[in-house]
Structure formats: C-alpha cells, structure tokens
Image (tube, grey):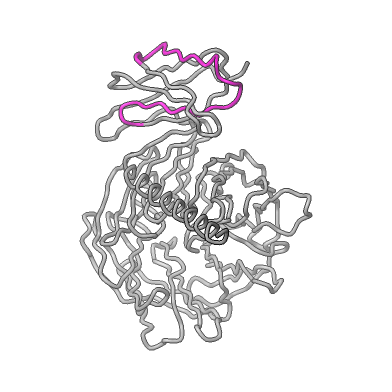
Amino acid sequence: MIYCLLVNFKIMKKLKLLFFFIFLNIFLNLNAQTDTRIYDNKVILQSYQNNIFIHPFIFEDYDNINNLCFSLTTDTAVNIYSIDSDLNIINVINIDIIEGSKKFFYFKMNDKLYGIRNYQSSFFTHDSTCFYSNDLIGNNVFNRLIYSIKEDTNKFYFIHTCFLTKNKNVAIFMQDKDKVNHKFGAKLFIIDTLGQLKISKSLDQIANQYQHIHETDSNFTIINVRNDNTGILPKAYYIDKITLEIKDSASFDSLFYIKYSKKINDSMLIAVSETPSKLSTEPERYFVYIVNCNDYATDSKIKIEHEGLSTNYNPVQNFQNMIDFNVEDSIYYVCCIRNDEGLQGDYSGFIQIINFGINGILNFDYKFRYDSLVPKVISGVKATNDGGVLITIQLVDNNCWVMKFHPKGIIGLTNVDTGEKEVIKVYPNPAKDFVCVDIEATNFEKGEIELFDMQGKLVKKAKLNAKQGNRVDVSNLNAGAYTYNVSLNGKTISGKVIVGK
C-alpha cells in the first residue's frame, strides 16, 4: 500500500512538472515577438519565436555595422532579422529551407547575404558543403560546391566558422572527426565572394577538439583551446595567408583550458578560461586573460567571482563568440551562470555581463538574475556604438530573447512603425511612504503599476491616470527591494525600487 502511494506520488510529481512545461511553453509562445520589457532601467528584452531548437545566429552586416543581424530557423524557413541598437526591427527576410539542408548566414555585404549550406544525410553527417548567396528579398543568387565528402563514410564533418578576410576573400574553417578512432582533422579553404576556390589546405596535424581561428595582417592564427585530460597547454599556430603553410607556433604560458578567445589587435588577445582548481573555501570563479600575441604570455588577468552557482557554461556552437568591443577600454564578455540540476532542480541563475579594458582593469560586473526551470543559452554578443551590448539568448525549445544592456541605463522605448515613445521615471529610490511615477508618452490615456516582493508575490497595484504626479502609497510595505511592472500602451516596463523605513 505504502509502495503504491509512493509510486503514485512520483507519477503525480512528474505530471505536475510536465503540465508546468506545457503551460510555460504556451505562455512563451503567446508572448513571442510581442513582449518587450525593461528591467532595472539597464536591460531591454525582446521575445522572438523559432520553431526548432537552433540558436539565434548573429552574423556581420558590413553594409551597416551599427545594425544587429541574426537568423531564426523555423520548420520551413530561415528568418533574417535586422535590428538597430534600440531593438527596433529594420527589416525581416524570409528564406525557404531546402529539404535535407541546414542554412547558416555568416555576413551581409553589398546588399547580399552570404552563407554555408550543409546537405545532411544524418544528424551529425553532411554529404557536401556549398557556399551560397541570397538577395535581400530571399531569392538565391548562386550556389557553389566547396567540398564533397560522400566517399568518406567513416567521418562526420562540420563547419567551424566562415568569415570575410581583410582582403575581401572568404575563409572557411572545417573540422572532421573519425567515427572509429575519434581523431580530429581540419581543413582551411580560401574562396572569393563568388565561391571560386583560391587555395585549400589540410591541417590535420594540428587539429584538436576545439579550435579558434583569428586573422592578423600577415597570418591566420589557429589556437588549440582544449586538451582534455592531457595537461598540455593551449597552443597557437601561425598560418601563412598565401600558402596556408604552418610558419611557427607558440604555447600559452599559463592557461590550461580556454573557453572563448577574441583578437583585440595584431598584438593582443582576450582569452576566457574555465574555472581552474581552487581551495574548497574559495568562491566559484573564472579568469579573463589579456595575452600578448607574440609569445602568448599573459600581460594581465581579471578574476571574476560568481557566487557559487554552477560553472557549466553555454553549450554553444564553436563559431559563436561571447566577446565583443568597439573600443579597447570597453570590452564585453557575457556568459550564463546557472544551476545545472535539470528536472530534479532548476536552471535559475543569472546572465553575467562584465566590461573591462585592454589594461586588464574591470570596469563593471552586472548580473541579470532570472528564475527558470528551463535552460537559457547565450549564442552571441555585439557591442553597440552607444556603449552598450546586444545579446541573443535561446530559451526552452522554440523561443529566444534579444537583450540590450547599457550601463548608464535605458529609460524608454520607441516604436519604429508609429514613432510612439514610452518613458517612465519611478522615484524616489529608495522610497519611504510613497513612490512617484512620471510618464512621457506620445499617446497616453492611462496605465497601471504593480509591485512584487522578492518572492514574486503581488503586494501593490495602482492605476496611473496622469502623465505627472502619480503617487503610490507604499507606507504599509515592509522594508526591502521590490520589482515593479508599469503597463503602458500595451508594453510592460519593469524595474526595481527599494522601500526603506
């Protein structure tokens, strides 16, 4: 009898969890592409929907470097979004998916999109690789076969990265893995923007599980960033840009495991390491290194602590970068720090945004906290000219966020279609007996404010009937931090206010 009750209890617990996921999925779908929120006056979130689990893919727009371009894949098409630094949608391009292929776009130039198509015979194996281009209304311009591997059934291949070189050619870095002995191989292709092959080279002798590739004026530099269970330090190989021959190599002086890297200039590199071994009494941490590209010695490093949550970072594709900058004294690195207990616990945690200079000085460390039973995966970042950063984030199975962060604060939203603007000011902060809410809006009739305690319980709700002088009584609330949601013209602007006594 007791056993049956226990079994039934476990079944009911699993059913409740299943119903929660169904409800959460429906809720997120209903809000996809319509829900825009401001948090802490420093973060804007915009929701989008993609029907299959492919991370939002950021690519370069060389026609307008101030815009963010990213693609979302559905069951039938790739949707290309172009947005400005305030998350206003400038353009959307719909491109049909050819059955049996997977499309990724890597850059936009001269009003054309360029990318790689992999024709797949299984989940991990593709039969051939094509370089292709589409115009801005979705029509295909050309397809060029780059590589065919139908004759080699013992390996599976994947595109590591594709980028426009300094002399306007296209570099494609491809890796493979032998299904029998699990060894890795690598190939580097240089083609022109019409897909004509200029030179290719096998680099199997330096292949490793995870590799980064960077370009300088004279070299391609390939970095082996991971050597599992070997104790071998990461190593950089200098590849001649004309012949693709290995010219030289250098070992890092202190790094064991590099997670991400980005070249700052021809002499400096940023490297982010996994959490190294530490004493049990020390907090969780990771390190950002500023590395000299001549000898790969560490010039400086920044220790980032993250309060003991899981150090399981984002399982993203290797071609994505978590680091970006416009000026060398304001470099962004973004990662997810979260619980990693899956269905037995939760994935709550925070998105950590750190900003530092080439001198190794940390400018600030911002944490965007969230409660969630499903994981969130960062797939790319782009620094903006106004000093902020745009971040694409996958969540659940068919939704994603685009996040804008600005350290000096974001106070409003402008609708690009109608020109309507919504700006609020909630003050004083800290508050004592009341808070005031002032509103600047192109079209305003009425609004509403809700206050929630740190457990998410609604503790106050009030109407906003005027643009200026709305007073909300908080004298009966306990001292502490509260989250507010202001509903205004179909949008929700959120933030935090402190109530003191």
Residue 25 located left or right of residue 356: left
Residues rendered magenta in the picture: 465-491
Q: Is residue 331 visible?
A: no
Q: Is residue 106 visible?
A: yes
Residue at the location (37% across, 77% down)? 122
Q: Nearer the viewer, residue 158 or 384?
A: 158
Residue 36 located left or right of residue 140: right
Q: Nearer the viewer, residue 499 or 27?
A: 27
Q: Which quarter shows the N terminus?
A: bottom right
Q: Which quarter shows the C terminus?
A: top right
Q: Is residue 466 magenta?
A: yes
Q: Nearer the viewer, residue 233 or 71?
A: 71
**464 vs 495: above or below:** above
Residue at the location (45% across, 12% down)? 471
Q: Number of labelled discs?
A: 0
- Quadrant location of residue 275? bottom right
Residue 42 located left or right of residue 69: right
Q: Residue furthest bottom?
A: 151
Q: Is residue 263 magenta?
A: no
- Quadrant location of residue 206? bottom right
Q: Residue 90: percent from the left, percent from the top?
A: 29, 43
Q: Residue 50: percent from the left, percent from the top?
A: 34, 54
Q: Residue 371: percent from the left, percent from the top?
A: 52, 43
Q: Residue 395: percent from the left, percent from the top?
A: 44, 51
Residue at the location (33% across, 74% down)? 119
**456 vs 102: above or below:** above
Q: Nearer the viewer, residue 180 or 85?
A: 180
**444 vs 66: above or below:** above
